[in-house]
Amino acid sequence: MTIFNLNRLRGGVQMRWYAAALMSIMLCCLLSACSMAELQRGRTLVQLSQFQFPDGGKAIYYQLEKKPWRQQDGDAPLANLIFVISGSDCVSMGEFLPQYFSGLEGESGRTRILILHKRYILPGSNGQACGDAFVRADHPSCWQADQLEFMRVQLANLKRQGITPKRVIVLGVSEGAELAPVLAQQIQATHLVLLSHSGKNALDAYRALATHYPAMQQGWQTLQTALLIVPADPDATRIHGRSWRYWSEIAAIPQTQNLLHAGIPVFLAVGEADPVIPPGAVDDLQQAFKLAGRQIHISRFPGVGHSLGGKDVNRLPDFMHQVDNWLAETDVHQTSMQ
């Protein structure tokens, strides 16, 4: 989800968006007992590996190789390196791969996709029991340090192999979009893509949603009160299932300003029926870009929610196809794409 778990904040309303809404595109691959695995699905190779951080911590990551749909282009140089930052909760993307990226079929060239999960997520994690260790490590400063280390190592490995991708893309999905602009700047990415995110600062989005959904107002007040006092153990103190440190750090991210200062082409996509996107938020972001003299490509999908899915409809492949074409058409020296 974008900034919080509505299932925790809205009582009986069952809204575990990230896990449930993607079930329609789930690929049933049994990786839960593996530390490393490789699957060949059509023309997409999915590899599961483990990354070790300098402090000894570990996290799993998936690597996908998307070959162009034209057979003759299968051995073309690497055009796109996409770092994906997934959303909240301890959900592994493994069971959704490779179908999650259907629609990204090589219009922009041969593509490698890398998805580093948060610490303590296992290949079979489904978000039902995240555990104390996960919650303690689940905060933006940890995400940023881990993602940055991973990205730099992957880029260095390619450089040693004499491989220079034409484009380096950071794709932030839902909550993962919170850090995408910062990481894109840190690794000098060429493109930035955000999916299912309003572009608003996290607590501004929460405030707007609490105004729109009366059932969330008590949760908003609880959060505001809790953040006034620094607890003895910020990692152990829980607010709506997340640590005090999580809320404190995510509140400090100036998301809108980070997007306005990205300095690279930006693509944002939302479902118009997404209940965690505050009403009018995307229009506000578009206006902010206009006033700043910058451009942003915004794609809206009517009738679908947070996962770009709905009853008998799945617009996620359409989004991926749009990204593919956008990458092919966008000059990396521009600051946006209409």
Image: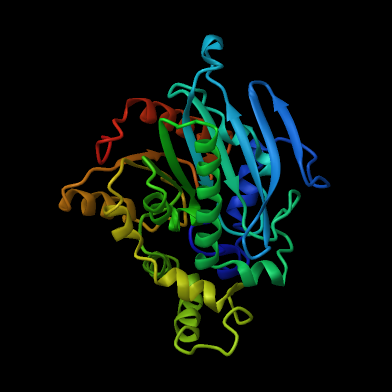
Left or right of 40, for residue 86: left
Query: Residue 257 appears at what percent x and percent y?
Result: 29, 60
Residue at 62%, 57% (x, y): give it: 118
Residue at 50%, 85% (x, y): give it: 226
Query: Residue 328 appears at what percent x and percent y?
Result: 37, 25
- Looking at this view, is 15 or 337 the one in front? 337
Residue at 17%, 53% (x, y): give it: 292
Question: For the view shown, which residue lies furthest in the right direction?
Answer: 33
Left or right of 138, for residue 262: left
Q: Is residue 144 shown above or below 216?
A: above
Query: Residue 36 appears at what percent x and percent y?
Result: 76, 42
**Do we see residue 181 in this rendering?**
yes
Left or right of 184, for residue 32: right
Left or right of 95, for residue 306: left
Question: For the view shown, which residue lies furthest in the top direction?
Answer: 72
Q: Quadrant of residue 26?
A: top right
